[in-house]
Image: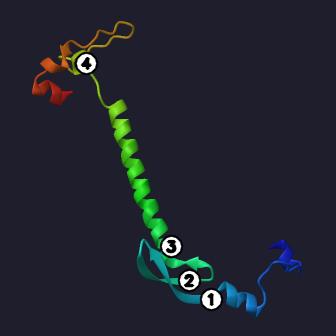
């Protein structure tokens, strides 16, 4: 931009012919697997190809997120409930330097104990 401000317009589109080529709007057709669809071309930009690219990117991103979610759930959400315990009373007495492990195994806990925890 500094070059254009200084008056050096090399490689800048300033003629009417250049603007006409850059901003031409034309109707065309695009062929997708034997099907033909109408398309609009602005300069060298295809509107239909852009929309298809956005749709494909959305589908690919969604699939990748679902795969990552499944992998994360498989790796990080499974645990052995028999190794877990709950406190029998709340608040649990926890003197500094003398912590006691919880005393009720999760499989043996009542619904009330699970709800309170």
Q: Sequence order check: which comes first, mark 3 or mark 1?
A: 1
Q: Quadrant of residue 103?
A: top left
Q: Which residue is mark 4?
A: 84
Callout 4 environment at 10 Å: few (<14), some (14 to 19), or many (20+)? few
- Between the residue at mark 1 and the residue at mark 2, the CA separation in whole angstroms equals 8 Å
Q: Is the Cβ of the residue at disc 2 closer than 8 Å to that at disc 4? A: no
Q: Is residue 24 left or right of residue 30?
A: right
Q: Is residue 102 left or right of residue 8?
A: left
Residue 24 tag number: 1
- Between the residue at mark 4 and the residue at mark 3, the CA separation in whole angstroms equals 55 Å
Tell me what residue is drawn at x 23 percent, y 21 percent. 81
Q: Which residue is mark 2?
A: 41
Q: Sequence order check: which comes first, mark 2 or mark 4?
A: 2
- Between the residue at mark 3 and the residue at mark 2, the CA separation in whole angstroms equals 10 Å
**SS at badge 3:** helix
Q: Is the Cβ of the residue at disc 1 closer than 8 Å to that at disc 2? A: yes
Relative to 93, is 9 above or below? below
Tell me what residue is drawn at x 62 percent, y 79 percent. 44
Q: Which residue is mark 3?
A: 49
Callout 2 environment at 10 Å: few (<14), some (14 to 19), or many (20+)? some
Front position in the image: 11 or 29: 29
Q: Sequence order check: which comes first, mark 1 or mark 2?
A: 1
- Between the residue at mark 2 and the residue at mark 4, the CA separation in whole angstroms equals 63 Å
Q: How many marks?
A: 4
Callout 3 environment at 10 Å: few (<14), some (14 to 19), or many (20+)? some
**SS at badge 2:** strand
Relative to 71, is 30 above or below? below
């Amino acid at each position: 931009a500094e070059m254009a401000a200084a008056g050096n317009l090399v490689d800048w589109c300033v003629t009417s012919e250049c603007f006409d080529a850059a901003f031409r709007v034309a109707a065309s057709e695009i062929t997708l697997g034997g099907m033909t669809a109408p398309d609009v071309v602005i300069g060298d930009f295809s509107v239909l190809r852009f929309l298809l690219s956005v749709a494909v990117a959305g589908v690919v991103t969604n699939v990748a997120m679902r795969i990552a979610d499944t992998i994360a759930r498989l790796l990080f959400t499974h645990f052995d409930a028999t190794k877990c315990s709950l406190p029998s009373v709340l608040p649990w007495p926890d003197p500094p330097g003398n912590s006691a492990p919880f005393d009720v195994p999760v499989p043996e806990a009542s619904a009330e104990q699970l709800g309170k925890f």
